[in-house]
Amino acid sequence: MDNVVFQISKLINRVSNEVDPEKQIKLIVDSISDLFSIDVCSLYLLNEKREPTLYATHGLKADHPISLGEGKGLIGRVISSKHLINVANAATERGYELIPSTGEQAFKSYCGVPLVRQGESVGGLVVQNRREEKLSEDYEALLVTMAAHLAAIVPNVMLLKGKGKKRLNLRINGVKGAPGIAVAPVYTLSSVSLDQIQAGQCKDVNAELAQWVSLREKVVLSLNEEKELLSESLGDSSISGIFDAYRMLLLDPALNMMIESEITSGANILTALKRALYSYADSFRAMDDSYLAARADDLLHLGNKILAIYNGPVKRDDTDLPKKPVILLGSDISVTDIARFPTGVIAGIVCVNGSYLSHTAVLANALGIPAVLGIGRNNRFVQGERIVLDADNACVIQNPSKAICNEYRRAGKKNSKEVEQLKQLKGLPAETVDGVQIRLMANSGLVNDIKPSVDSGAEGIGLYRTEIPFMTCQAFPTEDEQVQIYSQIFSAFPDNPIYMRVLDIGGDKQLPYFPIQDEMNPALGWRGIRFGLDNAHLLLTQIRSMLLSAGMSGELNILIPMVSAKEQIQAFKLLVGNALEQLEEEGISVKPPKIGCMIEVPAAISQIPFWAEELDFVSIGSNDLSQYLLSVDRNNARVASLYDPLHPAVVHEVNRAVTNAKAAGLPISLCGELASEPLAVVLLIGMGLSSLSLGAAYLPKIKKLIRMIDSKDAHAVLQQALTLHTTQEIRDCVKGYMETIGWV
């Protein structure tokens, strides 16, 4: 039995990693039949008519999908009741329905278990035997366990196997990389990828190490050349920041040490590179901070580039590239890929991998190309087939009907017109109809975020994450290294406030050179200011770096993360005082900063009145606050649907934080996704918030909305929303108001 459990675990991993849906379902039924020493194993999935359909079997005769009527047969009972059936003789059971063509009359016993995904039955798993005996309780439990795993990973093979006519208007969800709409044929990019590399050994360690150094130099040279050429040809200086980030990752001492260690242990260059980059990427993906998690995609982009240079130049015939608009499709799409195409040919971008904070998204936003990322591998597209890319709703529509295409074309023209109109708002204030000024600032963290923030009309940086330099070094970055980075932010916004969050590290955000282990719940563990105060020397260096970067002219506001006690604020202020004294003794003049704390731990909301005398301002971190209030990890697919920043509890607590801050005479701002959600912005203005920080790409649209709102009306909408009990009621309430002001 123990061996069977081990084999099932291996099978689940194999099924998860198999990208071909036909091989995936065949692997399931064959392997289970073998593991259980059973005659028949069959996988049923519900079709569009909710009919149980036999899509794969080991032991029965079925050359094509066979469907029963809805609720018919024992499998229909299993699926509709969401309850297993385990009998010694299936023919005597209520609802039994024989399908002679399959030859199942030869099999007596029957055990069927439902596949349930997100509360809904999607199919069933059945095993049958010639012997007239029930499946043992141990094997029954294992089959139930297997079904629970398979429900989460088995794709909708009806849509993916490609047999029969494709369903019209098949929606494939991803994440929004850059806003916009496109209707065009698919152009698939072929590329080499690290995940195709098989493990290999080197023959000569010293020669392999020397070859890695040489390869690294070639990659650096290539990055520098492409940076210069593409910044000119694509006409956007923010692109250079992407190459700078790749170069920083490539030369990271900790990453190089890991690669060299793998080679020293006997791995060849490509194996060492794959192991090191995947290890780094996994560490980033494990982080709760979505901004940092997105760096995993950048690492894999870099890895694929290194692999391409290792393999040598590939002769490309760009004369065969399309001349009419297409939607680029690929696992990862790089700056170099985009630069190959003539201006205006790329109508949109669709990536198998990636997130809304990856460099592909940054690039797409900079160039104004709509993009949907992270659609997953289990989706098949035919070169040249027409699709709809709806980046505004983070989806791709495959096999769209003529009516859908026409509707999206109309919407695309309307969007293009709106984008041009939004550009005209850059120099105008974010001011409500009744004259209330709202300061709109941008969230940032990478150097190449700066230009999009400036171009969007941001009035400063409302949240600058300082974690990145710490996470890409072999050791804690020096004061000079930090000053060099922070100074660029102040140079870009010389007359506007900069809100810099001190190092929010620890728990889930591991440093490669300072691992934190044995934490049962890292989200509630040693992170934020807790980590900082326990490592006061590191925090002091960072504070000095911020002060030096701002000098006498920069408007520095320092944010303390994860505050839950007044003593933490007081201890932090002592460190700021120490830093100011040290710089004065060194003869360096700097301006004292304003000090505020993040309101993200729910306990902080009630404490605002008691902390007011220690603070100059507070800022609501709506993402973390919402997650803590709802106890939902929005990056966990199993529970992400429960996360909604317009949940009544979130609306009430954000309003309570604003009320408490105003009563205490503290300026209050909000940074997070709430600030880019139009429905939420109406409520935030109704609460009296006058400072919001959001992604640069969303800022013009939110400015347009603000200029249509009357703050008194927004306050009335808020008062009504506070009486409602469900998220949907709140959304409907705000939508009703937005319709009256002409917001569609």
Image: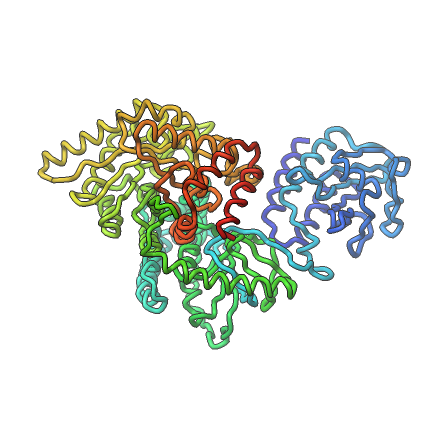
**Location of residue 453 with respect to 86 vertically, above or below:** below
**Location of residue 166 with respect to 151 vertically, above or below:** below
Q: Give the residue displayed 37% in from the left and 25% down from the top.
A: 564
Q: Is residue 272 visible?
A: no
Q: Which residue sits furthest bottom?
A: 319
Q: Nearer the viewer, residue 480 or 49?
A: 49
Q: Is residue 43 visible?
A: yes
Task: Tell me the quadrant of the picture where the N terminus can be found.
Answer: top right
The answer to whether 558 appears left or right of 34 in the picture is: left
Q: Give the residue displayed 34% in from the left and 27% down from the top.
A: 663
Q: Nearer the viewer, residue 507 or 58?
A: 507
Tell me where residue 524 sits by quadrant: top left
Tell me where residue 483 appears, x and y as whole percent. Answer: 22, 45
The answer to whether 548 appears left or right of 497 in the picture is: left
Q: Which residue sits furthest right?
A: 92
Tell me where residue 661 appears, x and y as whole percent. Answer: 35, 30
**Location of residue 663 with respect to 344 vertically, above or below:** above
Q: Give the residue displayed 62% in from the left and 44% down from the top.
A: 153
State how many labels appear: 0
Query: What kind of colouring is applied to the model shown?
Result: rainbow
Tell me where residue 597 appears, x and y as whole percent. Answer: 32, 32
Tell me where residue 361 appears, x and y as whole percent. Answer: 43, 55
Tell me where residue 243 sits by quadrant: bottom left
